[in-house]
Image (cartoon, rainbow, N blue to C red):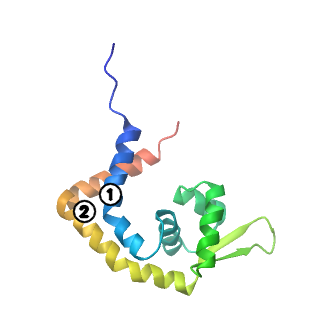
């Protein structure tokens, strides 16, 4: 019986969990979920996006995205608006409060990145990010 090869998907999940252990305490302290933070971060970097684009970039299924956006909108962090040309298209952007949330969390998040760099190293992190970006671009 052949020995199974190491599981890429399991190793990626385990590495994600190891990295998120640095960031979860900060998210919890600010009352945000990982999904909410991904949305805020992407909107801060990309600006206003259509909801389906945001779901794709944040790796959040569209049905789940509806709930995430509803909670962020309820908390005043994002705003949703329908396109004037096509009512089916919904655009999402950060409010001023959402922008401020990002700014407020930036110092904590940078501190967490520094803690990772201390243990992992800048060169390794850059190499890992490059490899992961290459992996993201392969097609089945």
- Determine whether 107 is above or below 90 in the image: below
Q: Quadrant of the N terminus?
A: top left
Q: Secondary structure at mark 1?
A: helix
Residue 111 position, x and y percent, is: 27, 73
Residue 77 position, x and y percent, is: 56, 79
Q: Secondary structure at mark 2?
A: helix
Asked whether, in this view, residue 81 is left or right of residue 116, the answer is right
Give the residue drawn at x 46%, y 64%: 34
Asked whether, in this view, residue 108 is left or right of residue 76, the answer is left
Q: Disc 2 marks which residue?
A: 116
Question: Disc count in the image?
Answer: 2
Front residue (pair 45, 2): 2
Residue 137 position, x and y percent, is: 47, 47
Of labels 2 and 1, earlier in sequence is: 1
- Determine whether 65 is above or below 137 in the image: below
Q: Disc 1 marks which residue?
A: 19
Give the residue drawn at x 37%, y 78%: 106
Say few, some or many: other residues with alpha carbon within 10 Å of mark 2 (under 14 / 14 to 19 / 20 or more): some
Asked whether, in this view, residue 54 is left or right of residue 126, the answer is right
Q: Quadrant of residue 6?
A: top left
Asked whether the beta carbons under mark 2 and mark 1 sit within 8 Å of each other, the answer is yes
Q: Quadrant of residue 65?
A: bottom right
Give the residue drawn at x 62%, y 58%: 64
Residue 114 position, x and y percent, is: 24, 69
């Amino acid at each position: 019986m052949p020995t199974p090869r190491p599981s890429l998907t399991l190793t990626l999940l385990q590495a994600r969990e190891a990295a998120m252990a640095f960031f979860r305490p900060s998210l919890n302290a600010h009352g945000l979920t990982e999904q909410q933070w991904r949305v805020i971060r992407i909107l801060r970097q990309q600006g206003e996006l259509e909801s389906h684009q945001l779901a794709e970039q944040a790796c959040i299924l569209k049905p789940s995205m509806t709930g995430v956006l509803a909670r962020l909108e309820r908390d005043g962090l994002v705003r949703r608006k329908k396109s004037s040309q096509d009512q089916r298209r919904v655009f999402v952007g950060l409010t001023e409060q959402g922008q401020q949330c990002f700014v407020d969390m930036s110092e904590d998040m940078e501190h967490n990145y520094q803690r990772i760099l201390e243990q992992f190293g800048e060169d390794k992190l850059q190499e890992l990010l490059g490899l992961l970006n290459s992996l993201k671009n392969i097609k089945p």
